[in-house]
Amino acid sequence: MDSIKERVGAFIERTGMSKEEMADRLGISRGALYSKLKGESEFSLSEAKTLSRLLGCSTDDLFVSPFERSK
């Protein structure tokens, strides 16, 4: 099963945007973004919506693995 770090990281890589730029666009520090990607803290609802808009995907694509959706 893939982790949120892997899913979000893959979407970020596809955009060509750096994690620092992504953190900036989310209005959080780079450290806060890394903490969220590692699962140490959670994305707020507004951060999740902004993240999905920036990455061109649904919030489900970011936070729910395809395996979990098929259950």
Image (cartoon, rainbow, N blue to C red):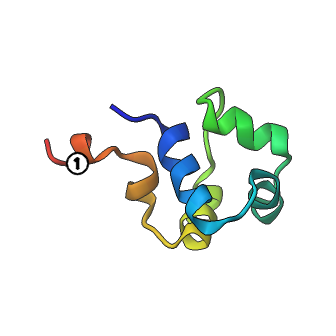
Q: Amino acid at mark 1?
A: Arg
Q: Is residue 52 above or below residue 38?
A: below
* Side of 18 relative to 60 (left or right): right
- Report x, y in % for residue 62: 46, 53
Q: List x then y, in percent, for residue 68.
A: 24, 40
**Is 2 rendered above or below residue 48?**
above
| Residue appearing at x 47%, y 47% in the figure | 7
Q: Quadrant of the C terminus?
A: top left
Q: Residue at x 42, y 66 (%)?
A: 58
Q: Position of residue 60 (x, y in %)?
A: 38, 56
> Is residue 29 or residue 3 the one in the foreground?
3
The residue nearer to you, when weighing 24 against 2, is: 2
Q: Quadrant of residue 32?
A: top right
Q: Position of residue 48 (x, y in %)?
A: 57, 57
Please tell me whether mark 1 sits on a helix, a strand or a loop: helix
Residue position marked by numbered label 1 in the rendering: 69
Residue lying at 83% horizontally and 60% vertically, measured from the top left: 24
Residue extending furthest toward the top:
40
Residue drawn at (82%, 51%) of the image: 28
Could you classify mark 1 by the number of other residues whose Cα lies within 10 Å: few (under 14), some (14-19), or many (20 or more)?
few
